[in-house]
Amino acid sequence: MTTIAIVYPSHDENNTLKQLFEKHSLLQKNKKEIYPQFLLVPVEKNENYFSVWVNYIIDTYAHLPDFVLFLADDPIKYSKFNSLEEFMTTLFNDPTVFIDKTKWLTTVKCNGQGFPHHPNLPVKESYQKVFGGSQPNDQDVYDFVHGGQAFFSQKRILSRPFPFYSQLKTLLQTEQVDKHSMERLWHYI
């Protein structure tokens, strides 16, 4: 059975995400079809989600679920869903929608200096620190989503060795790579 972890900030004031998760989990159990097993993983609020998300990868690297859904404060704000209910219904009924970020998130572009959204952001330099080498393409253009939300497969996460994530954790903790640059780089992992 497929497992999907949902890593989200636990300070959801009304427990809306948790309540919807429990509702959909119960509905899923009542159906005869085999659906993925979902794991709800609340994490403490942190100014830098990417540090929290990297810590989750490090902590579970040896036993990652099949997929991990990384959510920010407001998972709907930059998504193509109108409500959290619609989001959760889609996730439980057809999680494959989330594999292609363009099907559920609004993507934007910037250059290596953060233009036009965040001028003078060291995106290109941060890319070199995180990944080594040059930019991801010849045009100095970075596709990203606000908040960095992502749905990654275990295979994708494991395509980078454990030391990569340890180094990324250090870069984030020492603020050699800031959260705004990481927002632009997260989908290149």
Image (spheres, rainbow, N blue to C red):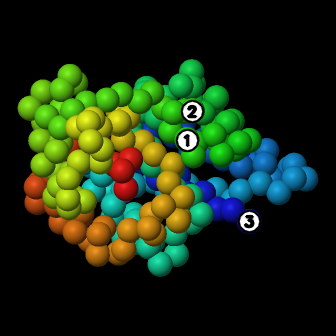
Residue under pointer 2: 103
Q: From the viewer's perspective, is 93 left or right of 59?
A: right
Under tag 3, what secondary structure? Answer: loop
Question: Seen in the image, is 25 located left or right of residue 127?
Answer: right
Q: Looking at numbered disc 3 in the image, what kind of residue is underneath it?
A: Met
Q: Position of residue 102 (x, y in %)?
A: 51, 33
When the figure is inspected, residue 41 is found, relative to residue 118, above or below; the finding is below
Q: Amino acid at mark 2?
A: Lys
Residue depicted at 74% across the width and 41% down the height: 93
What is the three-letter code of the residue carrying label 1? Asp
N-term-proximal mark, 3 vs 1: 3
Between 44 and 134, the one lying in front of the other is 134
The residue under the point 32% across, 56% down is 52
In the figure, 117 relative to 161: above or below?
above
Query: On the rendered image, what quadrant is the N terminus found in?
Result: bottom right
Instruction: Report if the CB atoms under discs 1 and 2 are less than 8 Å apart.
Output: yes
The C terminus is located in which quarter?
A: bottom left
> Which residue is labeled 1 in the image?
100
**Helix, strand or loop for disc 1:** loop
Mark 2, secondary structure of its residue? helix
Percent of width and height locating residue 175: 11, 54
The label on residue 121 is none
Real-space Cα separation, disc 3 to disc 1, in angstroms? 21 Å
Image position, residue 48 (x, y; %): 25, 48
Mark 3 and mark 2: Cα distance apart in space = 24 Å
Which one is nearer the viewer's eye here, 103 or 166? 103
The numbered dot on residue 1 is 3
Q: Residue at x 45, y 63 (%)?
A: 157
**Mark 1 Cα within 10 Å, few/some/many (few <14, many 20+)?**
few
Front label number (3 vs 2): 2
